[in-house]
Image (cartoon, rainbow, N blue to C red):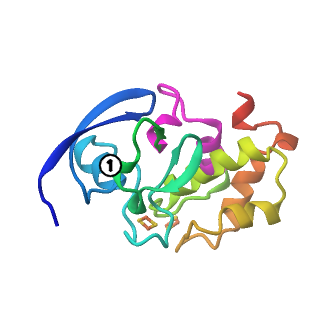
Amino acid sequence: MSTSRRILRLRVNGQPREVLARDADTLLDVLREQLGLTGSKRGCDLGTCGCCTVQIDGEPQLACLTLAAEVGEREVTTVEALRDGEEFAPLQQAWAAAGASQCGFCTPGFLMTTDWLLREKPDCNREQMREALAGNLCRCTGYVKILDAVERCTRSQGACPSEK
Ligand code: FES
Ligand code: FES
């Protein structure tokens, strides 16, 4: 396997970024180790836990299974971009209000999938939430409070983040 590095030009959270990456480096490697964006978590590194979920061109993707060299000019969005300055996003506030985080390790991945879901289906029901979030695993909460948090942000509850 080649260990030489080359310059990659990425777009991350609305900014052009340059990194030095090996062909085998994943997007998660680059985000965490080169760009200091440690919100995306390394859980399994195998594509099974969802802790590393980011959005690429608005769609949830597993950063641990995405080669950095294949991202190209597509827009990468990480959990760090949800927050608006000093303010937590409505989705993050809903997570806190519902008690949907315990250890919090899974939370960034859930937030990134949920942010997408609420744009796609602002009136999603619990079944649609479960289906969309099936790839995000949580060891702590039992999921009910997570669904409660998502429900707080549906359009019918008046707090949909996509309408802020
Ligand atoms: S770290 Fe990527 S799916 Fe678990
Ligand atoms: S809050 Fe601990 S893994 Fe989800």
Tell me where residue 9 sits by quadrant.
top left
Q: Residue at x 29, y 54 (%)?
A: 29
Which residue is the extreme one toward the right? 156
Q: Position of residue 66 (x, y in %)?
A: 41, 57
Q: Position of residue 2 (x, y in %)?
A: 15, 61
The quarter of the picture where the C terminus appears is top right
Q: Which residue is mark 1?
A: 69
In the image, taking residue 55 as reference, residue 41 lies left or right, namely left
Tell me where residue 148 sits by quadrant.
bottom right
Q: Residue at x 80, y 44 (%)?
A: 122
Is 22 rendered above or below residue 9? below
Q: Position of residue 54 (x, y in %)?
A: 49, 49
Q: Answer whether residue 139 is magenta in the image.
A: no
Nearest the viewer among 26 and 2 is 2
Is 75 rendered above or below residue 130? above
Question: Dot 1: few (<14), some (14–19), or many (≥20) neighbours within 10 Å?
Answer: some
In the image, taking residue 110 as reference, residue 46 lies left or right, namely left
Q: Position of residue 33 (x, y in %)?
A: 24, 49
Q: Answer whether residue 94 is magenta in the image.
A: yes
Nearest the viewer among 136 and 94 is 136
In the image, taking residue 123 as reference, residue 28 lies left or right, namely left
Nearest the viewer among 133 and 10 is 10
What's the magenta region? Answer: 79-97
Which residue is the extreme one toward the left? 4
